[in-house]
Amino acid sequence: MRNRFENKVAVVTGAAQGIGRRVVELMAAEGARLLLVDRSEIVHEVADALKAQTEVLALTADLEKFAECQRIMDAAKARFGRIDILINNVGGTIWTKPFEFYAEDEIEAEVRRSLFPTLWCCRAALPHMLENAQGSIVNVSSIATRGVNRVPYGAAKGGVNALTACLAFELGERGIRVNATAPGATEAPPRRVPRNTAEQSEQEKGWYKQIYTQSLDSSLMKRYGSLDEQANAILFLASDESSYITGTVIPVGGGDQG
């Protein structure tokens, strides 16, 4: 067992389910001290399962609001004394349909969900990370920046890619690396808290199926990824193993470049 994160403090958002949960499980096994954040109370269950391995704190927050992001980063500093790693994993498409069917409020909601938590968390964490002139930020983007039936989500994740590159330019000489992964279609257990609770029509189910068909067709490996395959790429970028990498978005989609 490697201990790449021994004595490191990591803040991981969207930690209750899916990729985020697998990230914190693997980081705990490698010695990280963790602050887990999610809007769902499930995050406390995840923290409880990790407490035998490491020091962990779980907090619920709505990271679409800057004040909430600031509260979380201040809590990390107060509890652990510093922030070494920030993994921005909050996001995910709410609706899947051709762009002409999106309403104005739906477009705004998609951008708030999948761009602003990353934007706000980076801004809130930076003062704490700059105090120590070192750190690693990993943003979770998506190969949906090139794909069907998720234009607002793809636009938001395109913003995450731009944020990643621009921050890397600003922070490269100040000891902080900024990178991103772009996950492709990934096999995961059903979400306990779905992003969209409305019952889908047959047409909407067809549009949803199209994004998975397109993702599989675009993958050179012709399969979905696993949670471990997504989490391992994130952990590599968060760790000192990638110490000479910054400003990079790594597609993790079986060859689909996004």
Image: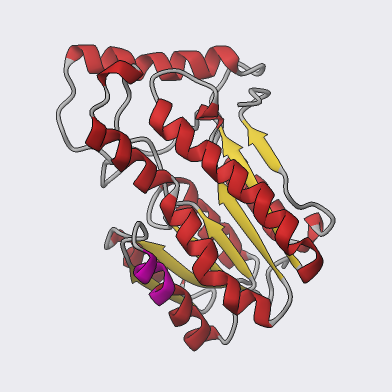
Asked whether residue 70 is drawn in magenta, I would say yes
Identify the residue at image location x=32%, y=65%. 61
Asked where in the image residue 188 lies, by quadrant, the reply is top left
Within the magenta stretch, is there residue 241? no
Identify the residue at horizontal 39%, vertical 76% (top origin). Answer: 71
Judge whether 215 appears above or below 117 on screen.
above
Residue 150, image x and y in percent? Answer: 40, 26
Can residue 89 be seen here? The reply is: yes
Q: How is the image coloured?
A: secondary structure
Decide whether the magenta segment is chiefly helix, strand or loop. Answer: helix
Using residue 199 as the reference point, say whether residue 212 is left or right of it.
Answer: right
Part of the protein shown in magenta: 66-71
For the point 36% across and 46% down, the residue is: 113
What residue appears at the point 65 percent right and 34 percent down from the top-left corner? 251
Which residue is more in the foreground, 158 or 203?
Answer: 158
Placement of the N terminus among the 4 image quadrants? bottom right
Say if residue 49 shows up in the picture. Answer: no
Q: Position of residue 107 (x, y in %)?
A: 31, 34
Above/below status of 132 relative to 108: below
Residue 82 lies, in percent from the top left, at 60, 82
Compared to 161, does 211 lie above or below?
above
| Image coordinates for residue 139, horizontal then vertical, percent | 57, 51
Figure disc tally: 0
The answer to which image quadrant residue 195 occupies is top left
Quadrant location, the C terminus = top right
14 lies left or right of 164: left
Answer left or right for 11 relative to 15.
right
Of residues 210 and 124, the one drawn nearer to the viewer in this rendering = 124
- Rendered view: 35 above or below 143: below
